């Protein structure tokens, strides 16, 4: 037998060697597959639910704060618009407290009916004048009452106004009767006309007064609501959208005096005899962008707080060698994991590879107003940004295999970044606000897992735009 | 091959029936592989389980290039290697002596054993020898590849293999007259 025949013989014999596993093995495999599937499903639904929940909460907060300050004038307006005068009358009579303002209306009782020598014409003119005067007084009182309107007393106030009008009418009619009786010049037709006046229920409500009140009420409602909106817009939660674009890179950590890890991919020595070799990776900046939603609230005159959710796409370019398609037996960074690699790159500088990172971030931001009085106010922003790395196509440099390949296991999922920037704000006629300015973001946590002894921090610099909705 | 592609397609969709079919198709052969790298059937079944979980997890990476059986076998071998390194039981035994071996004989004994007996004999080797012997003689890896896989030098791999081969040759020669003899590696 030749030297290689031994190996060939062994190989041919053992290639055919099979053993039947126990049935439980498949059950365990199936259970683990199902668990993995469930875990992925849970992750998906967690993020979906989180986004939907943030959206609803944002919407809810904005809506609630908007409505909280609004005064609802619709009941009063509906009564005004009601063609049946009994609707008002029933309100007037159903509430004894409403009678009190009527007793305190000296103007209406001061109508002077003592000019007994005047003609009916003159009396009529005088009566109209007084009626107008009475109306004028009523309107003055109305404005006072409307100023005092709120949710509880607006209908009452409306009813008071109506009662005042009716009282004035009745007094005026009584006065006319007195004049007619004393002058003796009134014919039957005129008498009937005058006598019938108070009986006409529709005339109890002065149409001019009703329209004026309606206008005033609407005007007050609008002004109240406007002021409420203004108040809300100043102090309440507001929603906005954000977008940013710029350059991102993968940087080694900032050396703060402690031991600084190199940005290497390293093999850890184990009892299995793995050697420790490093391969340095250099990255270059590449395009990066992000979009998101946020809600913001004014804390003080100068400080605003905001929180939101962003999707942030980072990129960094690294140089690699030739690309290979095939299976690489890549032992992972430690003995605890392995990589099944079907596509990889050799070490070298002949090609450029774009390392992509997909993160969901939750920026928690404080903004400080610097030049608030200027036409374009300037704010300085600082943020802490927890993030979750949910996808990456970044290469891992495996020095033992002399290859780069995509290795998702190398990264930590949860990241923490800090950001700072300047924002210039433009207000427009729609009362929405557009802010823009430079922003700088740095990943405080090391992207890679500790045992890799690799120091990778994502960096982003670019322009950010915030659009705060009305 | 066409059937395999359809099967893989269904497995990628997560169909349990297809997954079970794939398992049943390759499990006996793969358990044979796992058996050679471990010291007990229970350990071999653990590796098989772990290996199939990884196969289904990484099945998306199989593009249909190359034989499916070979792809699965490589995953299984990698899983077995990791299992050896991870398991305390094997860790201490998985030490590679880096001293060069002077090969004094290239004797090739006649192999008269059945596959299972041969596999049993290989399992009697110290774990380090066993691993390298399996990788080189059975899987067909080069010493450079074995060096990369295990994080050792090519020469260490070569030296370890020659020791394993010599030991196995001796046992095979002895076993020619007595098949039922138990070989102790201790």
Image (tube, coloured by chain):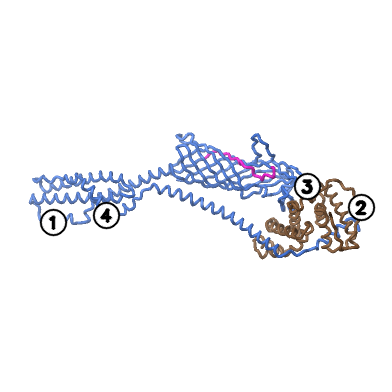
Chain colours: A blue, B brown
Q: Same subunit under labels 2 and 4?
A: no
**Front-most of residues B168 and A313:** B168
Give how far apart the Cα atoms at labels 2 and 4 are: 119 Å
Which mark, by number, is residue A273? 3
Q: Nearer the viewer, mark 2 or mark 4?
A: 2
Question: Can residue A357 be seen in the rendering of this structure?
Answer: yes
Give how far apart the Cα atoms at labels 3 and 4 are: 95 Å
Residue B76 location in percent, x, y? 74, 57
Residue A171 location in percent, x, y? 17, 49
In the displayed structure, would residue A424 be above or below residue B4? Answer: above
Q: Chain of mark 3?
A: A
Q: Earlier in the sequence, mark 3 or mark 4?
A: 4
Give how far apart the Cα atoms at labels 1 and 2 are: 145 Å
Q: Same subunit under labels 2 and 3?
A: no
Which mark, by number, is residue A192? 1
Which mark, by number, is residue B105? 2
The magenta stretch is: A436-453
Asked if the residue at tag 3 contacts the one at tag 2, i.e. Cβ–Cβ closer than 8 Å, the answer is no
**Front-most of residues A360 and B105:** B105
Q: Nearer the viewer, mark 3 or mark 4?
A: 3
Q: Chain of mark 1?
A: A
Left of A413 or right of it: where is A208? left
Quarter occupied by residue A251: top right
Q: Residues within 10 Å of mark 4 (few under 14, many from 20)?
A: some
Query: What residue is shown with label 4?
Result: A91
């Amino acid at each position: 037998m030749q030297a290689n025949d031994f190996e060939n013989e062994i190989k041919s014999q053992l290639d055919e060697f099979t053993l039947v596993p126990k049935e439980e093995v498949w059950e365990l495999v199936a259970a683990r597959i199902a668990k993995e599937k469930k875990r992925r499903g849970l992750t998906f639904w967690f993020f979906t639910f989180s986004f939907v929940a943030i959206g609803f909460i944002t919407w809810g907060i904005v809506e609630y704060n908007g409505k909280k300050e609004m005064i609802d004038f619709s009941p009063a307006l509906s009564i005004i618009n009601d063609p049946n005068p009994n609707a008002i009358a029933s309100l007037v009579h159903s509430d004894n407290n409403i009678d009190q303002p009527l007793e305190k209306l000296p103007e209406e009782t001061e109508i002077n009916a003592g000019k007994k020598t005047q003609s009916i014409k003159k009396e009529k003119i005088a009566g109209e004048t007084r009626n107008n005067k009475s109306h004028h007084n009523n309107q003055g009182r109305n404005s006072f009452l409307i100023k005092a309107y709120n949710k509880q007393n607006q209908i009452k106030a409306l009813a008071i106004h109506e009662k005042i009008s009716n009282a004035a009418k009745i007094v005026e009619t009584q006065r006319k009767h007195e004049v007619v009786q004393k002058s003796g010049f009134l014919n039957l037709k005129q008498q009937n006309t005058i006598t019938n006046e108070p009986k006409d229920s529709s005339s109890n409500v002065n149409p001019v007064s009703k329209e004026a009140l309606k206008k005033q009420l609407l005007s007050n409602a609008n002004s109240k609501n406007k002021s409420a909106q203004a108040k809300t817009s100043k102090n309440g939660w507001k929603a906005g959208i954000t977008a940013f674009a710029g350059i991102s890179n993968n940087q080694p950590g900032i050396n703060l005096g402690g031991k600084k890890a190199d940005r290497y991919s390293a093999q850890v020595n184990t009892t299995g005899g793995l050697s420790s070799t490093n391969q340095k990776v250099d990255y270059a900046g590449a395009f990066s962008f992000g979009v998101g939603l946020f809600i913001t609230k004014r804390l003080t005159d100068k400080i605003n707080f905001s929180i939101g959710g962003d999707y942030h796409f980072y990129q960094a370019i690294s140089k690699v060698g030739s690309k290979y398609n095939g299976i690489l037996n890549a032992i992972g960074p430690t003995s605890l994991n392995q990589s099944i690699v079907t596509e990889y790159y050799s070490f070298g500088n002949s090609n450029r590879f774009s390392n992509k990172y997909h993160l969901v971030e939750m920026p928690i931001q404080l903004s400080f107003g610097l030049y608030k009085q200027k036409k374009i106010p300037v704010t300085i922003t600082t943020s802490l940004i927890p993030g979750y790395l949910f996808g990456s196509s970044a290469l891992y440099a495996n020095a033992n295999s002399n290859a780069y390949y995509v290795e998702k296991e190398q990264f930590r999922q949860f990241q923490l970044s800090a950001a700072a920037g300047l924002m210039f704000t433009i207000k427009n006629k729609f009362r929405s606000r557009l802010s823009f300015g430079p922003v700088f973001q740095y990943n405080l946590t090391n992207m890679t897992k500790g045992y890799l002894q690799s120091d990778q921090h994502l960096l982003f610099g670019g322009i950010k735009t915030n659009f705060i909705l009305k | 091959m066409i059937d395999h592609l359809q099967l893989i397609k269904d497995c990628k969709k997560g169909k349990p029936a297809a997954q079970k079919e794939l398992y049943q198709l390759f499990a006996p052969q793969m358990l044979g592989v796992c058996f050679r790298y471990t010291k007990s059937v229970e350990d071999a079944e653990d590796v098989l389980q772990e290996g199939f979980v990884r196969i289904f997890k990484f099945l998306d990476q199989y593009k249909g290039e190359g034989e499916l059986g070979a792809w699965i076998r490589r995953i299984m071998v990698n899983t077995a290697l990791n299992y050896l390194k991870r398991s305390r039981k094997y860790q201490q035994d998985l030490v590679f002596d880096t001293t060069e071996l002077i090969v004094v004989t290239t004797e090739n004994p006649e192999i008269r054993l059945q596959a299972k007996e041969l596999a049993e004999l290989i399992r009697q080797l110290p774990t380090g020898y066993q691993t390298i012997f399996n990788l080189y003689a059975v899987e067909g890896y080069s010493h450079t590849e074995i060096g990369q896989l295990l994080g050792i030098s090519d020469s260490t791999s070569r030296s370890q293999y020659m020791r394993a081969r010599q030991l196995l040759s001796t046992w095979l020669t002895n076993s020619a007259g007595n098949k039922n003899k138990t070989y102790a590696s201790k």
